[in-house]
Image: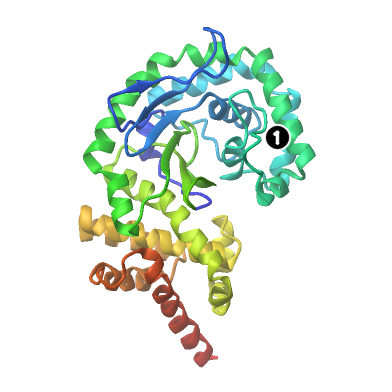
Amino acid sequence: MKKVIISLISLFFIFNLISCDKKDSQATVTTTDSTAYSIKESSTCNVSIEPKIELLSIVQYLADDPTIIKENLSSDNDKYSKDIASYFSKYIDDPVVTLYKKMLKTGFSYSTPPQAMLYVDDNLKLLTNLTLPSDVISAAGNKKTLIKFFDLLSDFRKKSSFDDFYLSHIDLYKKLVSTVKEKVDKLGCIDKLIDYYGYKQNSYNFIIEPLSIGGYAARIPSKNDKFDLYDFMVIPNDDAEFFQMVIHEFGHSYVNPLTEKNIDEVNKYSNLFTPIKDAMTKEQYGSWDFCVNEHIVRAVAYRNLDTNFSSGVNRRYIDMDTNRKFIYLDALSEKLKEYENNRNKYKTFNDFYPKLLETLKEFSDSSSTKK
């Protein structure tokens, strides 16, 4: 998903860090004792708050990126926002902030900035074993601009003493790790995700973005034709909201490649985009393939709500999204019952994906008949 907007009432825990294990591991960002380090715990998922992502978020905050929340927060979150404003306000015209504002205009927003940070090391240097995706480069304007942004971000980190700010909040981060660990353990999100899609990826990684408006997905090639999956997200207090967001975000790394693989078939039904194009574009899903992905990952998330919470919760989400013009969602959700009831036939979600396209074909054929 490019984005998921969650209600403010769900933001009571947006500083929370997820944990899947009792074992702490602290990876240093640089080589001295006074530098920021990630707070990370691992089990079926690796969950962390990362200094380079927090550094990015602060630049986004100063640049008035609409994906960053500053006001109408819970008391703890409001304090954190005010801490950022107080500590970094004098850097509002810093070159990295100015450049970021320009990059915003070329599409460097929502999922793209945190995704870009996966391609640099903790010292903001490009990783040599990975290739920057073309869509990330395009959103930044060009590769030269993106490299300049990383260099300016590194300079900003030093001149602003970002590490001191980060370390001053370590106790908060650690406390919240244990709080959210209980939620992850209780809900078992990753195991249920793997079971539903039918196969396991190389790794599952939560990176918490405390002031983000929602969640974003990314994946990086790993070994054995598998991927390292990433979920950048806030942490809603409500269990159902948290659960569906996790299934949704990681679900993109399963669904999006299938849409890409079947894009010729998907595009046969692009006439279905016409009646919802304006609404979808406002939601940042400005192309038919994005729209298809969003419908499918939502349908999967809400089917999992049905089996793990209640049909009433599932229905509430479907109705809410249908009102937002996700008009094929209900039918796709119903179609998924066939998958769930025939797992001997459909070992993985990949095997069933063409059946979902048959549902879109039915809508497309019906639409053509009405003309």
Q: Is 138 positioned to the left or the right of 206 in the image? A: right
Residue 231 occupies which quadrant of the picture? top left
Q: Is 203 positioned to the left or the right of 178 in the image? A: right
Residue, far top: 33
Badge 1: residue crowd in 10 Å (few <14, some 14–19, many ≥20)? many
Of the 4 image quadrants, the one containing the C terminus is bottom right
For this rendering, which residue is in front, 204 or 235? 204
Q: Position of residue 29 (x, y in %)?
A: 55, 19
220 relative to 262, above or below: above
State the SS at label 1. helix
169 relative to 358, above or below: above
- At x 66%, y 35%, the residue is 128
For this rendering, which residue is in front, 235 or 40? 40
Give, as a three-letter code, the residue at label 1.
Tyr
For this rendering, which residue is in front, 93 or 2? 2
Residue, far front: 224
- At x 37%, y 71%, the residue is 352
Q: Position of residue 289 (x, y in %)?
A: 56, 66
Q: Position of residue 185 (x, y in %)?
A: 24, 37
Q: Position of residue 64 (x, y in %)?
A: 63, 34
Residue 281 occupies which quadrant of the picture? bottom right
Q: Which residue does the numbered mark 1 point to in the structure image?
A: 100
- At x 47%, y 42%, the residue is 230
Is residue 279 visible in this depiction of the protein?
Answer: no
